Image (cartoon, coloured by chain):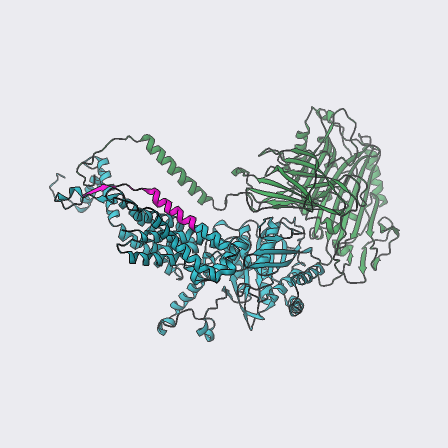
Amino acid sequence: MAKWRALFCLAACLYPSALAISTEQFDEELTIRPLPDGKVASTFRFTTLLQGATPRDPQSLGGDDVSQHYTVFPLALGQILREYAVTELHLSLNAGKWRYDRWGLPKELGVGTGAELWAWMGDTEVTSIDKRWKGLRNALAGLFCASLGSLDDLRTTSPVQTFQPEGDLPDWDSPHDVRHASLPSEHVCTENLTPFLKLLPCKSRSGIASLLNPHRLFDADWHGMGVHVLWREKEGVEVRLTFQSVSDPLRSGSRQKQDWSLHSLFGRSIERECPVAHSSRVLVALPQDQSYSITPEPPLVETEWAVFDTTKINMPLNTAMTWAQNFEFPTEFNGAPLTVKRTLRGTSQAYGQLSITVQNRLSSELPVLYLETMPWLVQFYLSTLKASIGGKPHALSNLTYIPAIPHSRPTTFQMLLTIPAKSDLEIVLDVNKAFLLYAEHPPDAQRGWDLPPAILTPLVPIANHSTGQLRIYTPTLLVDLATPDFSMPYNVIIFTCSLIAFLFGNVFNLLTRKFVIIRVGSDKTT
Amino acid sequence: MTDVQPQKPIKRILARFNRFLTPAENASELRIRRRNKTLGALTRRIGTIRLVLFVCGYLWMLALPSDRLARRVWIDENALQPNRVDVHWNWGEVHTADRYLDDLENLRDQNATSDQRAQYLLSQFQKLGLPSSTQKYHFSASSGDIQGSNAFAILSSPRVSGTEAMVISASWLSRTGDGEGQLNLRGVATVLSLAGYLNRYAHWSKDLIFIINDGYLDGMQAWLSAYYGVSQPNLHAEPLEIVSGVIWAALCVDYPGHSYSHLGIFHEGLNGRLPNQDLVTSLYYVASSNSPVIMYDHLDSRDVPDRRDELDPIPLWVPRVMRDMPDVRAYAYRAMNLLRHIGYQARGRASGVHGLFHQYRVDAITLFAYPATGPYGFHAIGRSVEGTLRAANNMLERLHASFFFYLLPVHHEFIQIGKYLPSAILISVAMIFGGLKIWSDAGWTRSSIIEQKVTSEPTWTRRRRPVIPSLLIVLATHLMGTLLFFVVKSSWFVPRYMSTAPILFITFTSLPPLITIFLPPPTVDEATTAPLSSLLKAFNLCIASTIISIISVLNFSMAASLAVFLGIPLSISSSSPNPLPRVFKYFSYALLGLGWLLFGSNEPKSAIRDWEMFGGWFAPFVCIVYAPLVFQAAIVCLQPQ
């Protein structure tokens, strides 16, 4: 280990950073939390801090950038950030539906199904934000092997209020703006995890990252990875790589116990520490009202959490938790205090109804910002918007509506809901389903179009998430638009050609024929 | 032509062909003359052509059960791969199902109410850790109010966004006797144990919704209305607390007996809708490895020789030699299946709970466990459902659009649209030819002025064809039908059916003659104006024919039934000089059109119930379309010649 550290120090001395970085700090943390419905949520967090660094000022985009030399900070990502002068960036790729009602709030907020990318960038005349946004999403698509290139103008919006920066924005002359896009149909798999692991200083060879075993992670009930870049004025540029998963120990086998171990969850245990990690901790949430045992004995217990420091503990580490009793499903779940149900009703391919039910379980009134970033495929009839609580009309306020432009811009629709204590607010809205040009239909199997989740932002702190802004994602929707039967191209061709030939033939005949009177003299039937 | 030398045959043919291509006379004139000649030949023989069309059409219908017209089924959507599914349902799950069955039998013995049953089912779903809920509903129908509660659970599949779903359901009442009271306890137990079992698999690409609906069709109608946000004035259904995404396929399990010997497939939906044939075929492929598969609850008497007397569909008056012929027996069995199918589809009646799904573009079928003393039970039905679900789980897109048009004479053979559609169309063409012929004949009359001229050819002159009176009569009959429909569906009619129906029949039968009495008798000079009866008949035939051809692609069975009931009767309607035959004919037609009021009581009642509760179109169709068409023919007969 000492040898490695010496080598890193040597490297740091040999290439003094032109960015005047004094230090880079890498921290890793794994949080494991048994859930009320028997599942186990794990959150990996790998934080790299580039102390004292600042994001690139977009005014300097025309000229040469300072050279970049990093030791633990991921260079591939750093290059993208500086090339497009991104101040803050959030990318998440998730599979599955996060069940707020059962699992509560996630550790990492971005849990919307599919891919979601949002970035804060400074405006400049040198290169516009939209141009850099396009470059950014294509660069990230290449980096993470994901179809982020499809997050095009059809899906890009600029919802400032919901996507407030997590860090600070530099005080440049030019204003900052946000770009947001999501692609709910994107699936996450190994090809996304491999480039993700390459951004880590220890890859998946040592430390907590060695638990990132694709075979187990992608078998989990829910999994998602995230890349977050932000700048804090006092500290510097921070890159946070996260991976969350929800595994089900009850799924396999007949044993009805919630028991888990690192080996049962990830198929591996931590064999050795990551030498460059400043801190490396495994946190396990301890159940409050059940009898259980945890091995090895946690060296430190912080209120409800058992803490294992991998730099100090005996290796290999295979934390395990066993319960005395069989697991029984509770009948009531005290999940997130705010849950939302969103459905697209109706059977027609031309119109439908969007129905949203927001439930406030708190015993106090809750103001919530509701945001829809709907592709133009589904267009809202805002005049039909109705909100009610238990059948009585309810007022909505602060409506912001940027209507969609067919074939290009998505709808941005935002409203402020004030939900009284312990009540369900129902909102219905008629929608129009678009009729696509034939070239707009995707070439793959036709199952409908995925619609991005809506996002709720409570305006007062709820639950334990008092720090920062909270976002709650609704499940995605599938809309069935009128689709020609592309699997019968020959029939379609034959039909249309016959029709056109028939019409053309008749018209051509009438236009070119000479009309004369013929007397059929000897004919008996006059 | 001037060539006098003997020609070789080929040269002669060539010369004739040449003459045909470059005629000596004016080409256009020749063409017109040729066209007139062809048309003349056709119109002169129109009677024969119509006869041939009628005979061909009806013979074609009779030939439908023949195995010459059918072909073996295949899976069109390759993704389904029903032969490759892995099925793991085993005796452990059978044991679980047996335990559920014990509980359900207890509930039955305690005469548990709908709510108690729903609470029990809810608690079982909750024990399995599935998000679950109940839904109360209340129907008010003219045949009495119905209320109940459904219980359902949604298994959110791992890693799936929850935008797509499949349904596995069982109704509390079985379909035997159309939900007349036999309980589907084993079907419910199967669904409950499937819920616990399928929960353990990680490979579902869609959410699974488990529904135990109360009643027979009513519970599912309430659930579906709430799921799709469709409101119905006579239904009060609670909104669903939990929802999933777009439903692609639904399997309804109906297992009323103790054990079963054959697995029957029921596929007809409301208003003649059918599920995609790929789903039926997938079930057949999967299920036939577990237990024998049949259509409906029709056992083939050839498979169970000891029950032949009871099962044989061939009537006893057919000579024994014929009844023993294999071809005849095959034909009889297939004909029985087709007639059952036509019975459901023509009446637009759902043959099981699955039938309510089709209106929402969900492919759905019912698996019916034919009650017997053995040898199959939970093991075989569980494997069949699991396998079919696994096949449907592979589905990437909507099933193929053209696979909704089929007739299934047996489960493993089907008749393609091109081989059954012409039978109804031929009859419809024969009818429209008849109508057009009458229409064109009505425009001409034999001129009486030129009678002194001695000529072998009759002289024809044109006469007027006033369309307004006949169209008004057509309109009036349909209005009368609409009135009849509103009377029949009103809430006071059904409870007093036996007393009111004959009065209705008499009223609506005597309305047209009464009105014609009060109207001034039309003073028509037949020499200058066409008689009303022929114009009315022409319209009648043309309208009926158009309706048959349009319906034939939507609901073939209904079109075929209309072709049988209307084809010949409408074509032979005619007035006669004596009043007695006129009245006799009129009443025969009235019986054909409204006889159901007198002779059926269950059938009209259930058709009205279908309309009230599920929106079945059969009752309004009979009242507003079918009966008026027959009455138009009746009025034709009533006209003095």
Chain shaded green: A
Residue sticking out furthest to the left: B4
Chief SS of the magenta region:
helix
Residue B197, image quadrant: bottom right
Pick whichever, A285 or B419, lies toward us.
B419
Q: Does the magenta segment cover residue A92?
A: no
Report the front residue among A174 and A240: A174
Number of numbered discs overlaid on the protein picture: 0
| Identity of the residue drawn at 65% across and 48% down | B161
In the picture, the quarter occupied by the N terminus of chain B is top left
In the image, is B196 to the left or to the right of B427?
A: right
Residue A10 locus on image (x, y percent): 83, 37
Which residue occupies 79% across, 27% down? A171
Q: Which chain is cyan?
A: B
Q: Position of residue B590 (x, y in %)?
A: 38, 57
State which quadrant residue A416 falls in. Answer: top right
- Residue B353 visible in the displayed image: yes
Picture quadrant where residue B509 is located = bottom left
Q: Does the magenta segment cover residue B472?
A: yes
The magenta-colored residue range is: B458-480
Q: Residue furthest bottom?
A: B306
Q: Position of residue B102 (x, y in %)?
A: 66, 69
Could you tell me which residue is drawn at 38 percent across and 67 percent down?
A: B327
